[in-house]
């Protein structure tokens, strides 16, 4: 008899080596996330390339495509009606091996916006009380884990090396909206240039893909409003 | 010898969590010309545990609070096993670090309507002093530190594993051997100063909270290099880990603030068992007390069928729970429960290693050129760490290590490592890949975790610890035969084999130190010696590698420099 909660799934995993095994029958007990399936695959083929760290949606390193959609493996339950799943590396980034991608283009864009807080030159320090409108605007975009799901879901980010992508622009928004920061104007100018906020077409792939419920498209819209008003 | 690429830095930092990145920023602040290398076997600023901190950061900032009170709480919580100078440094520097995180690095912490920092209550504390950003404090701190590190332009060796400390022919520290795990290529990193800040080792238990990377690599490489390690028996179990069957989610922490906010713990009979164990502090007692109480309920048959107890905060109301603990509620929904609506099953989960390398207040060790910061170091927390003192430790001592390293390298040269040491280290790392046949590491790791949980967990006995020792000796022999197939490039199976080697080293030190401490104190509970014994055991167990490579143990009296266990302030201590 089958133990309760035990499921078998047929998993097709993208592999870099064309000779490597791609299809696995994996048994898991509920509750199980896609990450648990990958850990099951690892027992069948220890050479499978995938990455994860925290397994609680904080590190953002386990983002892959599950049946074509970008998602965190650690937070994606296996759909109740599924008996097979397809796992692929994130789109729009070079593949290191199997499901592991090279995030360099993502971080290059992120770093371009000068994402570091700059203390005001006059030495004044301000704080944002609960209820301060600036705090609400910053908090809306703050909990990004830089997993790259939005990048992979964006039609432009991977294809157009000139476009900064949703996550970098969202990070820029959290600083431009932060009245404590001393470099808001410079940063707004950076993201208002070619490749910045004007390039987004508002297809909202990013906002639909974000595992943390952030709406990068809304952040880009806010930045664009400010850059026009600047 | 085969030629390996040689990289050079002024300061080499191993680890990229709170301690590692704070260290890098403080090296750069002290002297922007210094060449910094950050070695991280995971993603820089994203792997490891500081980022997973939910609850918050203890710092004396509230009106009416005092560093003396924070110090007393830290020693009371640590059952006076703490290195008092480290604890004193921790509580004194914490407010300054919060100020730096907020005003220099831009962290956004929760504030009240009137603009004061929102300080929340945590277990074992006499004052509400935990700074936080909702229940994602670590994400905010690590996100902003990561951004600042982009500013300083350090050399980031991401996905590079540190293998060993290497020395020149006269015994001077020369640097590290490394493995670029993306390409599988070994290398040598020569540095004037090395800072080890890799984090702890609690993943060696069946139910465990930390990120995958936390396999005790830093402690293991320090042990192999002959350093002294103290309090290795002191491994903290967090009382409220998620129960999720065989899923990797099992053991993920539901944060301390839930108990601070008034959550109840009940066994399967509906009894609020903390009423029996600590009628005054109840669920807000320290982690060691609450975790062991829950464990006893479970092993004595009053737990749930899945092996847990119930955590219930639903009396706070769903809206309030969603607002304050939204991430925690979402986490429970993944396993078919809902914190916002009713009780969820929790189990104690291995969480944090109080023990580690012996350091001084500037993170210096007994080896010239070597500093250790964060969870790899021992002493600040004694026998039990307070919730909210962990991220405080990693950032406070990371910053201090950075300043100390920047100062040190002015007077310290570059040494070239002894090629024989490099060859031995690299050979050891490549061995699992080169072996034609042998066991995979995974099943050995499973046995390690199960054995440590059963025999060296929340309740220990001499007989159980001897079984653990025998198991570890068996596993050490088997791990020497592990063979991992597949390519050199980005091969997690190979890395799991190397992780296991570190875990086995650290596990052995935990077991040996636990055997030595024949009393109960903090996280270390011996059913055969259930009482705390200050007359004989106000001393640290110190382990180091003996001549035969086996652990050699001694004990050292705790120096009561500021506060006696009866609460009496000593000269130089708090008023």
Image (spheres, coloured by chain):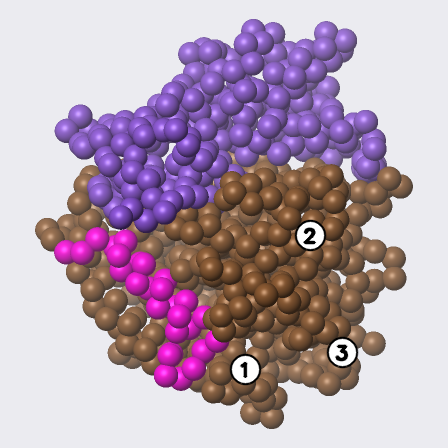
Chain colours: A purple, B brown
The answer to whether residue A9 is magenta is no
| Residue numbers of the magenta segment | B438-465
Q: Position of residue B38 (x, y in %)?
A: 46, 45
Residue at image point 26% right, 48% down: A1
Instruction: Say which residue label 2 marks.
Output: B313
> Which label sits on residue B373?
none
The residue at the point 35 percent across, 68 percent down is: B451
Judged from the image, the secondary structure of the residue bearing numbered disc 3 is loop
**Is residue B561 placed above or below A113 in the rendered structure?**
below
Query: Judging from the image, what secondary structure is the residue with disc 1 in?
Result: loop
Which label's residue is closer to the chain start, 1 or 2?
2
Quadrant the C terminus of chain A occupies: top right
Up the image or down, B204 lies above or below A91; here it is below
Residue B462 visible to an observer of this rendering: yes
Give the x, y percent position of residue B466.
34, 81
Marks 1 and 2, how far apart at CA: 31 Å
Residue at mark 1: B520
Question: Do we see residue B9 in this rendering?
Answer: no
Q: Does residue B479 sit above or below A32 in this rendering?
A: below
Q: Nearer the viewer, mark 2 or mark 3?
A: 2
Q: Which residue is mark 3?
A: B572
Left or right: B340 in relation to A14: right
Label whose residue precedes the other's in the sequence (3 or 1): 1
Q: Chain of mark 3?
A: B
Q: Chain of mark 1?
A: B
- For the residues labelled 3 and 1, the Cα–Cα distance comes to 29 Å
């Amino acid at each position: 008899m089958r133990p309760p909660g035990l499921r078998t799934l047929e998993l097709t995993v993208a592999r870099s080596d064309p000779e490597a095994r791609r299809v696995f029958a994996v048994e898991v007990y509920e509750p199980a996330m896609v990450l648990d399936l990958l850990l099951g695959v690892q027992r069948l083929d220890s050479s499978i390339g995938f990455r994860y760290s925290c397994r609680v949606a904080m590190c953002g390193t386990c983002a892959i495509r599950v049946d074509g959609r970008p998602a965190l493996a650690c937070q994606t339950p296996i759909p109740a009606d599924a008996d097979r799943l397809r796992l692929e590396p994130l789109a729009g980034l070079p593949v290191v091996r199997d499901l592991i991608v090279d995030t360099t283009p993502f971080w290059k864009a992120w770093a371009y916006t000068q994402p570091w807080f700059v203390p005001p030159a006059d030495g004044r320090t301000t704080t944002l009380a609960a209820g301060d409108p600036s705090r609400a605007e910053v908090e809306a975009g703050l909990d990004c884990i830089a997993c790259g799901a939005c990048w992979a879901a964006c039609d432009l980010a991977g294809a157009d090396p000139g476009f900064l992508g949703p996550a970098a622009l969202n990070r820029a928004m959290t600083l431009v909206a932060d009245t404590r920061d001393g470099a808001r104007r410079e940063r707004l100018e950076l993201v208002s240039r070619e490749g910045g906020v004007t390039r987004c077409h508002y297809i909202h792939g990013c906002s639909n893909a974000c595992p943390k419920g952030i709406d990068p498209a809304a952040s880009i819209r806010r930045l664009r409003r400010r850059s026009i008003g600047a | 010898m085969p030629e390996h690429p040689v990289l050079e830095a002024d300061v080499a930092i191993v680890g990229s969590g709170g301690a590692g990145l704070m260290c890098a920023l403080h090296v750069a602040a002290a002297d922007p010309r210094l060449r910094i290398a950050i070695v991280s076997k995971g993603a820089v600023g994203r792997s490891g545990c500081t980022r997973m901190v939910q609850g918050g950061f203890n710092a004396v900032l509230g009106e009416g609070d005092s560093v003396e009170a924070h110090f007393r709480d830290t020693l009371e919580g640590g059952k006076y096993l703490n290195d008092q100078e480290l604890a004193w440094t921790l509580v004194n520097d914490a407010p300054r670090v919060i100020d730096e995180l907020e005003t220099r690095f831009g962290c956004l912490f929760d504030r009240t309507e009137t603009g004061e920092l929102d300080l929340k209550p945590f277990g074992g504390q006499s004052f509400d002093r935990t700074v936080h950003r909702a229940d994602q404090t670590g994400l905010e701190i690590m996100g902003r530190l990561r951004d600042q590190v982009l500013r300083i332009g350090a050399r980031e060796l991401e996905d590079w594993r540190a293998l060993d400390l290497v020395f020149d022919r006269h015994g001077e520290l020369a640097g590290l051997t490394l493995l670029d795990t993306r390409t599988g290529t070994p290398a040598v990193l020569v540095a004037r100063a090395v800072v080890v800040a890799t984090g702890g080792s609690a993943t060696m238990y069946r139910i465990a909270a930390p990120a995958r990377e936390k396999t005790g690599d830093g402690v293991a490489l320090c042990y192999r290099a002959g350093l002294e390690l103290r309090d290795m028996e002191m491994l903290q179990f967090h009382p409220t880990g998620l129960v999720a069957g065989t899923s990797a989610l099992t053991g993920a922490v539901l944060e301390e603030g839930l108990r601070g906010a008034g959550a109840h713990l009940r066994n399967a009979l509906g009894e609020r068992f903390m009423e029996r164990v600590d009628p005054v502090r109840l669920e807000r007692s320290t982690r060691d007390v609450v975790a062991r109480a829950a464990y006893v309920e479970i092993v004595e048959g009053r737990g749930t069928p899945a092996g847990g107890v119930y955590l219930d905060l639903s009396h706070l109301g769903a809206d309030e729970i969603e607002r304050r603990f939204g991430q925690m509620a979402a986490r429970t929904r993944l396993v078919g429960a809902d914190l916002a609506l009713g009780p969820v099953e929790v189990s104690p989960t291995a969480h944090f290693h109080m023990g580690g390398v012996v350091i001084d207040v500037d993170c210096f060790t007994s080896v010239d050129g070597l500093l250790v910061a964060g969870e790899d170091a021992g002493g600040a927390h004694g026998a039990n760490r307070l919730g909210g003192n962990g991220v405080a430790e990693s950032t406070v001592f990371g910053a201090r290590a950075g300043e100390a390293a920047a100062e040190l390298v002015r007077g310290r040269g570059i040494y070239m490592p002894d090629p024989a040491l490099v060859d031995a280290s690299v050979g050891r790392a490549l061995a699992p890949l080169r072996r034609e046949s042998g066991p995979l590491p995974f099943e050995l790791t499973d046995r390690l975790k199960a054995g440590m949980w059963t025999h060296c967990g929340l309740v220990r006995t001499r007989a159980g610890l001897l079984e653990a020792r025998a198991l570890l000796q068996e596993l050490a022999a088997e791990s020497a035969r592990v063979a991992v197939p597949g390519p050199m490039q980005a091969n997690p199976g190979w890395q799991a084999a190397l992780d296991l080697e570190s875990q086995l080293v650290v596990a052995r030190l935990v077991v040996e130190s636990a055997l030595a401490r024949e009393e109960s104190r903090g996280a270390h509970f011996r059913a055969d010696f259930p009482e705390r014994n200050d007359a004989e055991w106000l001393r640290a167990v110190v382990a180091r590698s003996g001549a035969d490579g086996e652990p050699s143990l001694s004990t050292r009296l705790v120096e009561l420099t500021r506060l006696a266990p009866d609460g009496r302030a000593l000269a130089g201590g708090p008023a």
